[in-house]
């Protein structure tokens, strides 16, 4: 432990000290510290005014949740002393392994007891790999026929949301099923990953039964794999837990010895819960290693890992900060803010290798004047890398039923689903969610081909005064086995309305840079939508399904945007209703084919038509066809030359490097902010080229039409 001295404040009675070498019977002074957070919480009740609790360097292991309630002292900051490394963990340490041989390789094993619950395992540096079968690639269902395999959806019909309790598999592809009840099936489909412990397996028929129901229908093109398979234990840093015998197995790295090995198994989910007491803040703390449990029967929702439990939990509390903390190697959600949370800030934190959400805000959909509204929350200057590592459909920053939330200057990458999601009401029904700012975030390498129907930024429902601005989003990749469906940059989903989308750079997304799945009165201006695989702008009107409450059919105004395609990818798609949107002063260009540009009224690129045809049909109004003169767009440098025709037409450049964390700041304990280039890790995506039937003859018709228009003006 560090022996650095402290410069005591004028009133040291407002300070409490805690050390791993302390004692909760001590007085909590610098020279006589306490030992636990629980002890500090109790001592704080005896003090007046605001209090700071300093933790000395070391590991603090939680065996139970520490609960802050109305009887506890408010206005307390719990922080590391002098930037020493302070770790809060729920990991149970395991030592005393013995050497054995498993599947022909050297392994270590330890009897941890049949009552042990190990959902995650880590060493001093990283989370370790649970065995997976197959080790690469996927398996596919063979069918879901058979008696009593179906649990219909809420309407009693078989639909997308039909639940299953079993499926047939190819029995020739299955591994040796030692202890089938230890195995977990992971199905990837739609926008949901299913976590399904095995109930039983019939090797003669290939029937695989689950202890939980699925949330969504199983299809033959769904991918799945198995976890915690004994037969797959063969690579260094892999582990397997034999639940029936209570034995933990681990394949060591070279140089690791059984007698010196320490591994930690996470079991406890929530380390700290704050409910009913204000201003409980944390600063400079490392939260590392918790576990997760599955809800019996099945998940409440197919969306966004809604059920994931948090490490740090807040509800019915106000005016607190979580600052310069690090959350790493967590099996579930990191920070949760629930009902009646106001005036909170999550800033300068690092989230790495998180099982579900990094930040999860979930209020109640109550009237805006209600005292129960969750609002005035800032999530800023955080580095989020590797989220959704256990619950694959988790969102890095998820906001449900809250308003006046600012999500700014975050860097988010390497998740399997949406990076930022705001809203939880589909269509035009009432929602308390409005006045949110999603600005200057750097988002990249998400989706990674695992799931579908996602966006770098995703919204739902009416959100007046919500602004999406200054963000850089690239490389959003959906599940290719579902046709690459739904790898979008900015995704305004059902009913998204009254939202300003301005000064965003979205490029190299598997599907489209911008997608609106019906909504009303949105403004989309001064953005760059470029080099995405299917089209750059997709607008689905869905008027037959839902029209705004006032009967209006205007979905969006597109003004002063740069739309750059490549390889004849479409500019616009799905614009099948001329009343759906208005466009003005937009720049169009193809990086390879110049002014040969295409659009479509549907999703099929083979049924495209040229931009000239779109103008003739009234889908596009007065496009500006010109090279915008990017510095090197195909190598993802989108700086504009001063002589750009786009600037001449009114486009206003901004500094893309402003997206992401801020220079001159410290994130977590010692990471420097602003170090990632706006186009870091950019990769070209597969392009779906357009095809216009009878293009040559249609082009002649367009030329005649343009001549006649000029003639009779």
Image: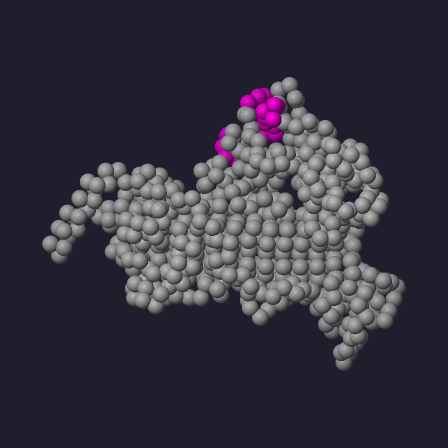
- Determine the residue positioned at 73% across, 45% down: 253
- Determine the residue positioned at 61% across, 23% down: 172
669 to 66, vertically: above or below? below
Q: Quadrant of the C terminus?
A: bottom left
> Is residue 132 among the parts visible in the rendering?
yes
- Give the image location of residue 444, x and y in percent: 51, 53
Foreground of the two, 438 or 642: 642
Foreground of the two, 256 or 563: 256
494 to 584, vertically: above or below? above
- Give the image location of residue 609, x and y in percent: 28, 43
- Give the image location of residue 17, x and y in percent: 80, 68
In the rendered structure, the answer to whether residue 243 lies left or right of residue 31 reads: left
- Kindly give the residue lying farthest to the bottom in the view shown: 10
User: Does 593 appear in magenta?
Assistant: no
Q: Which residues are magenta?
A: 144-173
Q: Quadrant of the N terminus?
A: bottom right
In the rendered structure, the answer to whether residue 295 lies left or right of residue 93 reads: left
- Kindly give the residue lying farthest to the front in the view shown: 255
Foreground of the two, 146 or 560: 560
- Kindly give the residue lying farthest to the top in the view shown: 204
Q: Quadrant of the rendered structure where residue 3 is?
A: bottom right
Q: Specify the principal SS of the magenta part.
A: loop
Colour scheme: one colour
User: Does 165 appear in magenta?
Assistant: yes
């Amino acid at each position: 432990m560090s022996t650095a001295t402290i410069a005591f404040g004028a009133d040291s009675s407002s300070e409490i000290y805690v050390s791993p070498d302390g004692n909760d019977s001590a007085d909590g002074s610098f020279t006589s510290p306490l030992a636990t957070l629980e002890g500090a919480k109790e001592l704080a009740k005896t003090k007046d005014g605001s209090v700071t609790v300093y933790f000395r360097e070391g590991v603090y292991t939680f065996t139970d949740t520490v609960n802050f309630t109305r009887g506890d002292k408010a206005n307390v900051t719990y922080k590391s002393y002098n930037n020493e490394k302070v770790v809060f963990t729920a990991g149970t340490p395991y030592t005393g392994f013995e050497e054995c041989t498993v599947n022909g390789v050297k392994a270590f094993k330890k009897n941890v007891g049949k009552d042990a619950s190990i959902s995650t395992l880590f060493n001093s540096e990283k989370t370790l790999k649970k065995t997976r079968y197959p080790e690469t690639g996927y398996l596919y269902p063979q069918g879901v026929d058979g008696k009593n395999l179906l649990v219909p959806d809420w309407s009693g019909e078989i639909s997308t949301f039909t639940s299953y309790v079993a499926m047939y598999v190819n029995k020739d592809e299955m591994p040796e099923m030692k202890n089938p009840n230890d195995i977990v099936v992971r199905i990837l489909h739609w926008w949901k990953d299913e976590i399904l412990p095995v109930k039983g397996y019939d090797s003669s028929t290939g029937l695989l039964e689950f202890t939980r129901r699925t949330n969504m229908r199983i299809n033959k093109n769904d991918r799945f794999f198995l976890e915690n398979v004994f037969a797959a234990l063969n690579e260094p840093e892999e582990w397997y837990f034999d639940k029936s015998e209570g034995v933990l197995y681990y394949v060591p790295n070279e140089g690791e010895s059984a007698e010196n090995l320490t591994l930690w198994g996470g079991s406890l989910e929530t380390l700290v819960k704050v409910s009913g007491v204000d201003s409980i803040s944390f600063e400079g703390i490392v939260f590392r290693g918790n576990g997760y449990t599955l809800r019996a029967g099945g998940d409440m929702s197919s969306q966004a890992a809604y059920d994931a439990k948090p490490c740090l939990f807040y509800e019915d509390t106000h005016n607190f900060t979580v600052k310069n903390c690090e959350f790493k190697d967590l099996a579930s959600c990191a920070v949760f803010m629930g009902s009646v949370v106001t005036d909170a800030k999550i800033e300068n934190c690092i989230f790495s290798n998180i099982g579900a959400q990094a930040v999860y805000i979930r209020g109640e959909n109550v009237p805006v004047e209600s005292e129960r509204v969750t609002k005035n929350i800032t999530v800023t200057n955080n580095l989020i890398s590797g989220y959704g590592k256990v619950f694959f459909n988790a969102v890095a920053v998820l906001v449900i039923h809250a308003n006046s939330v600012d999500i700014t200057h975050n860097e988010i990458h390497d998740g399997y689903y949406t990076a930022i999601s705001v809203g939880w009401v589909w269509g035009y029904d009432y929602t308390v969610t409005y006045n949110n700012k999603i600005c200057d975030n750097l988002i990249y390498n998400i989706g990674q081909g695992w799931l579908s129907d996602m966006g770098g930024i995703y919204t739902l429902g009416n959100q007046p005064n919500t602004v999406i601005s200054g963000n850089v989003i690239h490389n959003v990749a959906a599940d290719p086995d579902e046709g690459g469906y739904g790898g979008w940059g900015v995704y305004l989903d059902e009913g998204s309305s009254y939202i300003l989308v301005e000064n965003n750079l979205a490029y190299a997304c598997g599907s489209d840079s911008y997608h609106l799945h019906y909504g009303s009165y949105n403004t989309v201006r001064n953005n760059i939508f470029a080099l995405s695989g299917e089209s750059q702008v997709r607008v689905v009107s869905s008027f037959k399904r839902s029209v705004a409450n006032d009967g209006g059919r205007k979905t969006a105004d597109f003004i002063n945007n740069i739309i750059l395609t490549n390889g004849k990818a479409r500019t616009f798609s799905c614009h099948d209703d001329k009343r759906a949107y208005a466009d003005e002063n937009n720049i169009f260009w193809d990086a390879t084919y110049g002014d040969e540009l295409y659009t479509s009224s549907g999703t099929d690129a083979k049924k495209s038509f040229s931009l000239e045809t779109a103008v003739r049909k009234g889908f596009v109004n007065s496009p500006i066809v010109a090279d915008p003169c990017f510095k090197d767009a195909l190598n993802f440098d989108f700086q504009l030359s001063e002589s750009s025709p786009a600037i001449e037409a009114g486009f206003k450049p901004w500094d893309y490097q402003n997206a992401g964390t801020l220079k001159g700041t410290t994130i977590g304990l010692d990471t420097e902010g602003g170090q990632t280039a706006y186009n870091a890790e950019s990769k070209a995506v597969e392009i779906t080229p357009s095809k216009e039937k009878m293009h040559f003859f249609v082009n002649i018709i367009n030329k005649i039409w343009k001549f006649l228009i000029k003639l009779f003006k």
